[in-house]
Amino acid sequence: MNDSIHHSIDPEDMQRRRFLKRAVGILSVPLAAVFGYPLVAALVGSIYRKSPLAFSKTPGFTAAPEGQPIELSFDYVKTDAYLRQDVVEDVWVIKHSPVKATVFSPICPHMGCRYNWHSKMQEFICPCHGSVFSVTGKVLGGPSPRPLDTLSYKIEGGTLYVEWERFEPGIAEKVRI
């Protein structure tokens, strides 16, 4: 017989191997949890729950002219799993009085482009596909399936706070993304 095939296994070697297998297994669980949780939270968590909305302070409202659209910017913190990111967004605001306004999302409901206010024509016009909207957000022309999306707001002490959210483009219903 060939002696190289029939060699004896040292019992101490077996114990070391068994110990190493168990140690690797035990250490793998916390590592998998630490590295796996953000991935699972980002992929699965956002499917089942929408992030809570919060009001963001939108400077410039007190100086806004009444009855005319004005583009205002605000900062908010976007959170996705463990990632937090400071984001600047714009909204179109029409001040009706010091305590009443209309706040439009700047995103066209057709395909998600950003539209602009044309003061000479007194219309919002999307440069991408030609949707045209009145000062009240009503569709005047083009392929947009719904009026401009309005955003929730509150006014406290003359300061405007906007609740930022996005909506599904290209459909007739206003559905939050």
Image (cartoon, rainbow, N blue to C red):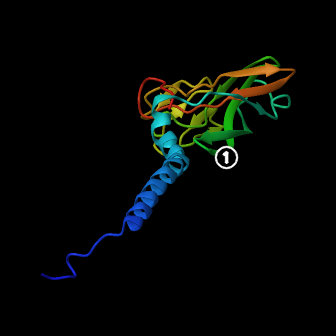
Is residue 136 at all visible to an observer of this figure?
Answer: yes
- The residue at the far left in this view is 1
Depth check, front residue: 88 or 138: 88
Q: Where is residue 118, by image quadrant?
A: top right
Would residue 101 be found to the left or right of residue 157 on screen? left
Q: Residue at 56% across / 48% down in the picture?
A: 34
Residue marked by disc 1? 85
Can residue 127 be seen by looking at this rendering? no
Amino acid type, mark 1: Gln
Q: Nearer the viewer, residue 123 or 11?
A: 11
Looking at the rendered structure, the number of numbered marks drawn on it comes to 1
Nearer to us in this view, 94 or 130: 94
User: Where does the image place residue 62, in percent across and percent down from the top left?
Assistant: 85, 28
Callout 1: 10 Å neighbours few (<14), some, many (20+)?
Answer: few
Instruction: Look at the image and tell me in which quarter the N terminus lies.
Output: bottom left
Could you tell whether 112 is left or right of 54 in the image? left
